[in-house]
Image (spheres, grey):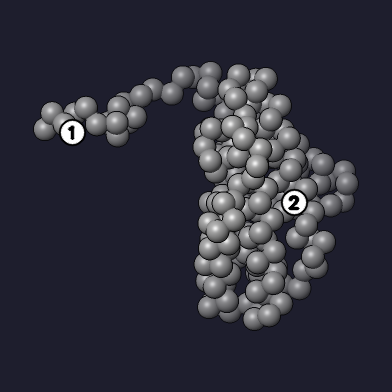
Amino acid sequence: MEAIKGSPLLKNRARRLHALRLLGSCLGCLAVIAMTAYLSTVSGLSFLLPSFGASSVILFVIPTSAYAQPRSLVGGHLLSSAIGLTVYFWLGTTWWSLSLSVGLAVAVMLVSRTLHPPAAADPLFFMMQGGLSWQTVMVPALCGSLLLVLFAFIYVNRVLKRPYPQYWL
């Protein structure tokens, strides 16, 4: 029983999140999505993917995580989105092609060392949209994820006073 009391899991559960860190993380998520949505509105291009909401949580709550690093975030979104569109063009949208696209995306992210869990949703999004062009994948997947990284670089280092990124590539 003593071994359980001193376990890191219980220590993490008992740890209180500092109110300013909580506020700063929440405002970072709000600000990056607001900025990206605003740029989408004024430019007429969509820089947003639904999975960017989950990506922003990783970026601003746990910026030291391997999943938050630029290689994982940008690479994961780009590869997963491209896989979704490729599978759509080859196989269409069926229950098995949707599941295949997610499995392939996870496999490619693992092999390429670009694992970013929210990006596993990107193939589903692009396949369910149907008939999109490569440009419609590149703008939100590449440009949008680069915007997230740029904003996080500024915000996490300046406002949250935490180091970001741990590494670029």
SS type, badge 2: helix
Q: Give the answer, above or below, for where 121 lies relative to 131.
A: above
Closer to us: 121 or 34 = 121
Quadrant in which residue 81 is drawn: bottom right
Quadrant of the image containing the N terminus: top left
Looking at the image, residue 8 sits to the left or right of residue 30; the answer is left
Outermost residue, right side: 43
Mark 2 and mark 1: Cα distance apart in space: 45 Å
Residue flagged by tag 2: what amino acid is it?
Leu
Q: Residue at x 30, y 27 (%)?
A: 11
Closer to us: 162 or 144 = 162
Quadrant of the image containing the C terminus: top right
Q: Which residue is mark 2?
A: 142
Q: Residue at x 36, y 24 (%)?
A: 15
Residue flagged by tag 1: what amino acid is it?
Ile
SS type, badge 1: helix
Q: Position of residue 53 (x, y in %)?
A: 61, 45
Quadrant in which residue 80 is drawn: bottom right
Q: Residue at x 52, y 25 (%)?
A: 22
Q: Position of residue 160 (x, y in %)?
A: 60, 21
Number of the label disc, if any, that sits on residue 4: 1
Q: Residues within 10 Å of mark 1 (few under 14, many from 20)?
A: few
